[in-house]
Image: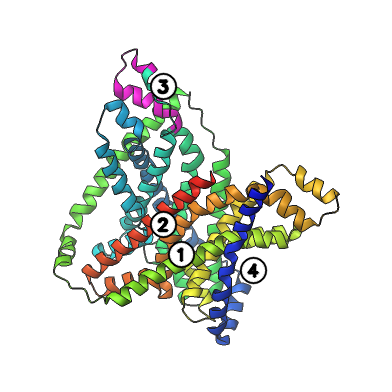
Amino acid sequence: MNKLKLNYTSLSFLPILVCIPLGYQLINNIHFGGFKLFQEFLISAFNPKIDNEIIITVINRLNETIIIGFFSWLVSIIFGAIFGIISSNIFYKIFNIPNFFYRIIRFFLTIIRSIHEVVWGILLMQIYGINFSIGIIAICIPYIAVNSKVFAEQLETIDYKSFESINQINAPKLSSLLTIVWNPIINTFENFGLYRLECAIRSTVILGLFGIGGIGTSIFLSFQTLNFRELWTYLWSLAILIIISGLIFKKIKFNTTNKNLSIFFIAVFFITILFSFSCFLYFIFKNIENFNSVSSLFKSSSDLVLFDFLKLILETIILSLLSTGIAISLPPLVIGIFNNNSSKIFIKIFAFLLRLIPTPVILLTLLTFNNPSLSLAALTLGLHNAGITSKLLFTNLDSQDKRNYIAMKSLGISKKTSWLLGLFSQQAKSYLAYCAYRSDIIIRETAIVGVIGSVGLGWQLQESLSSFAWQEVTIVLIAYSSIAIIGELINGKIKNSLT
C-alpha cells in the first residue's frame, strides 16, 4: 500500500518536467527593455491610487460586476438544477421516459459546456455588439451546463427504492420526484452553488477585459494606459469583494426541513424563470435585425489551410498539457521545498494574487519582457491554475491528521522528507483526482490566452471573427469543442480510476 501511495506521490511531481522545454524557450525569447515596466507594475501593488474620483469609479464598477455576476449565477444555478434533474437517471425511471432523450440532453449540455464563456462572449459581441446583457448570457450558457452536470451527478446517487416506497402510497409522480430530489438539490447548492457565485464574479471580470463592463473593463483600460497604481486599486478592491463574499458563504447554512425556506426557494425559482424568459425574449426581438449577420454564415468562405489548422489544433493541445503540468506539480514542489510557517504565508499570498489577477493581465504583464510564444501562454495559464490547485492542497493538508508526520520527525527524518511521506503522500491520490477535473477547465481556458498571446485556436477564432469569416468560426468552434470533449472523457476516466 505504501508503494502505491509513493507512485501517486511521484506522479504528482513528474509533470514539472514540462518546465525544461518551456523554460528554454522563455529564456531565448526574453528581452530586457520591459523589466523596468514590470518592476513598476510590482511596486504599484504597494502604492495603489486612492482619491475620491477613483473610489466612486470603483464603487460603480463593482456594482456592475456584482449585478452581472449575481444574475448570471442565479439564472445558471436554477436552470442548472432543472437540466440536472432532467438529465439524471432518476427522472427517466420515475416517468418511464426512453433513455434516448436522456442521451440527447446530455450530449447537448456537453457541447455548450465545452465552449468557454469568453468564447461565447466574443461570439455574441460580434453578432450583437457590446451589450450589458451579453455578459449575463455568455456566462449563463456554459455555467448552466456545468451546474447541471454537478446536480445530475448528485442525483445519480439517490437510491431508486426511495421512489418505490413513496410510490406505494400512490403519490403523484411529480410530487414524488420533488420529494426525492429536494434535499440533494439544496445540499449541492450549499456545497457547490455558493462557490459558483465567486466563479461567476471572476468570469464577469474576465469578460470585462473584452469590453462587457464592470471592473474588468477598468482594469484593462488602466493597463492600456500603463496606469499601474490605478490598476492595483481595482485589483485590491476586487480582492476585498472576493474575500468578503467568501466569508459570507462560510456563514450561510441551510435547514432543509424549514418549510418557510422551501416556499422561499420555490418562489425565487419560478420568479427567476419567468424573469429570465421575458428578458431573453426582449433581448432577441430587440436585436432581431442582427440575425442578418448570422445568415452570412452560409455565404462566407473559409481560407483556412489544412496544415496550418492542424498546427493550431496541436498548439492548443500542447498548451493544455504544458499548463496542466505546471498546475499539478508546482504547488506540491514549492510547498515541499519551502516547508516552514513564514514561507507558507508568502506562498498563500502569492497563490491568492495568481487567482486574483485575471489571466489576460498576467499574460500582458509578462509580455513586457518576453516575446509572444506558446511557452509564455502555457506559463501564464499554468501559474493561474497553480494558484487554484495550491488553495485546495493547503486546505486538505491543514485538515489532515499529522500523526505520521510528527512521528517521522521524532525519528530524526528530515522535515521535507517527513512532509512528503507523512503528509503529502496521503493527499496525492485525491489531489491528482482534483487536478484531472481542473484540467478540463484548463483546456477551455486556452481560448483566453490564445486570444491575447496569439497562439492556438483562440487566436484563429479572434482573427476569423474580426474578418467576419463565419465558416472559419464554425470550423474553429467545432475543433475547439471536440478537443474539450475528448479531454473531458479522458480526464473522467483518470478521475474515476483515482476515486
On residue 487, the disc is 2
Q: Residues within 10 Å of mark 1 (few under 14, many from 20)?
A: many
Q: Where is residue 231 shown, x and y percent of the image?
A: 52, 69
Task: Identify the magenta region.
Answer: 165-184
Q: Residues within 10 Å of mark 3 (few under 14, many from 20)?
A: few
The label nearer to you, 4 versus 3, is 3
Q: Considering only order in the chain, which callout, 3 or 4, is on the residue closer to the N terminus?
A: 4
Q: Considering only order in the chain, which callout, 4 or 2, is on the residue closer to the N terminus?
A: 4
Between 84 and 68, the residue placed more toward the observer is 84
Q: Helix, strand, or loop for circle 4? A: loop
Q: Give the main secondary structure of the magenta stretch.
A: helix
Query: In the rendered structure, which amino acid carries the disc numbered 4?
Result: Phe
> In the rendered image, which residue does mark 1 sit on?
320
Q: Is residue 67 left or right of residue 340?
A: left
**Relative to 105, does residue 221 appear above or below in the rendering?**
below
Query: In the rendered structure, which amino acid carries the disc numbered 3?
Result: Ser
Work out how far the residue at label 3 is from the one at label 1, CA to CA, in angstroms: 43 Å
303 part of magenta stretch: no
Q: Helix, strand, or loop for circle 3? A: helix
Residue found at the very far top of the displayed protein: 169
Work out how far the residue at label 2 is from the one at label 4, CA to CA, in angstroms: 40 Å
Query: In the rendered structure, which amino acid carries the disc numbered 2?
Result: Gly
Work out how far the residue at label 2 is from the one at label 1, CA to CA, in angstroms: 10 Å
Q: Is residue 155 left or right of residue 298?
A: right
Q: Where is residue 67 shown, x and y percent of the image?
A: 41, 51
Q: Considering only order in the chain, which callout, 1 or 3, is on the residue closer to the N terminus?
A: 3
